[in-house]
């Protein structure tokens, strides 16, 4: 098969959507090498490199006016290139498909990661909510098949867009394979020194926005400080909500207990997440008390890294964490403080969580995730 991808975010996005795109493309190219993969992107950057794969081809707009109006090329005009290259299936990796692709005879698949903007529109710009609603709903209605990255997302697609259940396949995602590799002690000490990390620390990974719930971690840190005195390292940035968190830290003498790495470092190995496996493996535990997610990739990254996880008992988090995580009510400071204390001090609990986490992570290998997506493609041909 000739399989095309809407691959803009593989080349331009350094967070979840970009990681998903790059990991899935590489996994398919590696485990199903008998197919040809075409990445359609408005521009090529150093964020993704296809040099290791002979069956991966990068396609950018080549002729005027597409070279000038790349958004129009990506959202509609790309259909001409799909026909020219004999694309059998076109996969929108992040919520979109070209307008009118259903009229070309080319089968299409769209991955929907979450519908958070539908559930919590107050957390988004109102104009963005209208745009997202139109694009996501169109893609779900007019694609040949919809991929949801969790049962939670599948349920939301059915609820909000009334898409038939039999049109939606759940295909879990994997994370970068580097998280499954145990970093050498020497390398960990190098990373620890480079980032000036403390001997012990809790880890928070993700955008500093209200839904990610960093404030509850900080409140738990205050409650448990007299018994533990383990600081928190935050990987991620934000604006208004971050300032709210910082105000709380200042008011409660916790400013020195929370380290915002993204404020201190912007080197290439940090921006590309190359150093993240070592940072995870140096941590006491990952804390990820999000109130709602499509999947929650940091939880999976921690399980692969053999690091205990404290996370929410809501949304898709039990899907991602399985029986390995320590679950808390994301609104409860007491539950958060208790979880932090237990996970940090009970070595038997820690080892049990690590063992169960590694076992649960095997459900999300790159090969299994790629196989699930390939089965969706094969059902269409």
Image: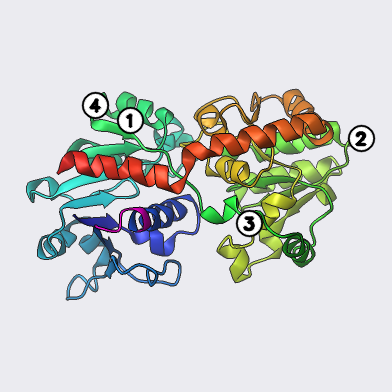
The quadrant holding residue 376 is: top left
Q: CA distance from mark 4 to mark 2?
A: 53 Å
Q: Residue furthest bottom?
A: 63
Q: Is residue 31 one of those drawn in magenta?
A: yes
**Front of the two marks 4 and 1:** 4
Q: Viewer-proximal residue, 379 or 261?
A: 379
Q: Viewer-proximal residue, 98 or 365?
A: 365
Q: Secondary structure at mark 1?
A: helix
Q: Secondary structure at mark 4?
A: helix
Residue pointed to by mark 1: 157
Q: Residue at x 69, y 55 (%)?
A: 279
Whether tag 4 and tag 2 are in contact, CB under 8 A, the answer is no
Quadrant in the picture for the C terminus: top left
Residue 201 point in image, percent of width and height: 79, 47
Q: Earlier in the sequence, mark 3 or mark 2?
A: 2
**Front of the two marks 1 and 3:** 3
Q: Which mark is residue 226?
A: 2
Residue 294 point in image, percent of width and height: 46, 36
Q: CA distance from mark 3 to mark 2?
A: 29 Å
Whether tag 3 and tag 2 are in contact, CB under 8 A, the answer is no
Q: Is residue 186 above or below residue 337?
A: below
Q: Earlier in the sequence, mark 1 or mark 3?
A: 1
Q: Which mark is residue 347?
A: none
Residue 313 point in image, percent of width and height: 59, 25
Residue pointed to by mark 4: 166
Q: Is residue 109 above or below residue 194?
A: above
Q: CA distance from mark 2 to mark 1?
A: 45 Å
Q: Earlier in the sequence, mark 4 or mark 2?
A: 4
Q: Main SS of the magenta segment?
A: loop
């Amino acid at each position: 098969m000739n399989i095309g991808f809407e691959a803009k975010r593989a080349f331009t996005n350094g967070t979840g959507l970009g990681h998903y795109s790059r990991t899935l493309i590489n996994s398919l190219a590696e485990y199903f090498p008998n197919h040809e993969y075409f990445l359609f992107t408005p521009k090529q950057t150093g964020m993704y490199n296809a040099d290791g794969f002979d069956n991966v081809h990068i396609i950018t707009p080549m002729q005027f006016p597409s070279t000038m109006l790349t958004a129009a090329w990506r959202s509609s005009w790309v259909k001409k290139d799909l026909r020219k290259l004999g694309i059998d299936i076109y996969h929108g990796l992040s919520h979109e498909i070209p307008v009118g692709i259903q009229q070309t005879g080319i089968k299409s698949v769209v991955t929907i990661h979450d519908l958070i903007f539908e559930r919590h529109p107050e957390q988004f710009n109102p104009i963005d909510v209208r745009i997202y609603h139109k694009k996501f709903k169109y893609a779900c209605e007019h694609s040949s098949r919809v991929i949801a990255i969790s049962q939670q997302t599948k349920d939301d697609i059915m609820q909000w867009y009334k898409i038939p259940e039999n049109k939606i396949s759940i295909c879990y995602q994997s994370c970068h394979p580097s998280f499954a590799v145990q970093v050498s002690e020497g390398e960990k000490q190098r990373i620890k020194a480079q980032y000036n990390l403390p001997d012990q620390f809790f880890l928070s990974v993700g955008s500093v926005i209200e839904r990610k719930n960093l404030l509850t971690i900080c409140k738990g840190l205050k409650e448990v400080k007299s018994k533990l005195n383990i600081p928190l390292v935050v990987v991620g940035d934000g604006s208004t909500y971050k300032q709210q968190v910082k105000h709380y830290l200042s008011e409660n003498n916790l400013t020195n207990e929370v380290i915002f790495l993204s404020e201190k470092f912007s080197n290439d190995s940090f921006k590309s997440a190359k150093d993240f496996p070592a940072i995870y493996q140096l941590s006491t535990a990952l804390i990820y008390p999000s109130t709602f997610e499509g999947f929650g990739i940091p939880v999976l990254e921690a399980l692969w890294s053999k690091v205990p996880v404290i996370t929410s008992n809501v949304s898709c988090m039990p899907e991602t964490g399985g029986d390995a995580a320590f679950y808390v009510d994301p609104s409860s400071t007491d539950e958060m403080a208790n979880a932090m204390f237990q996970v940090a001090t009970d070595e038997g609990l820690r080892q049990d969580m690590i063992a169960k986490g590694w076992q649960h992570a095997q459900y999300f290998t790159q090969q299994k995730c790629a196989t699930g997506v390939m089965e969706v493609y094969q059902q269409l041909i």
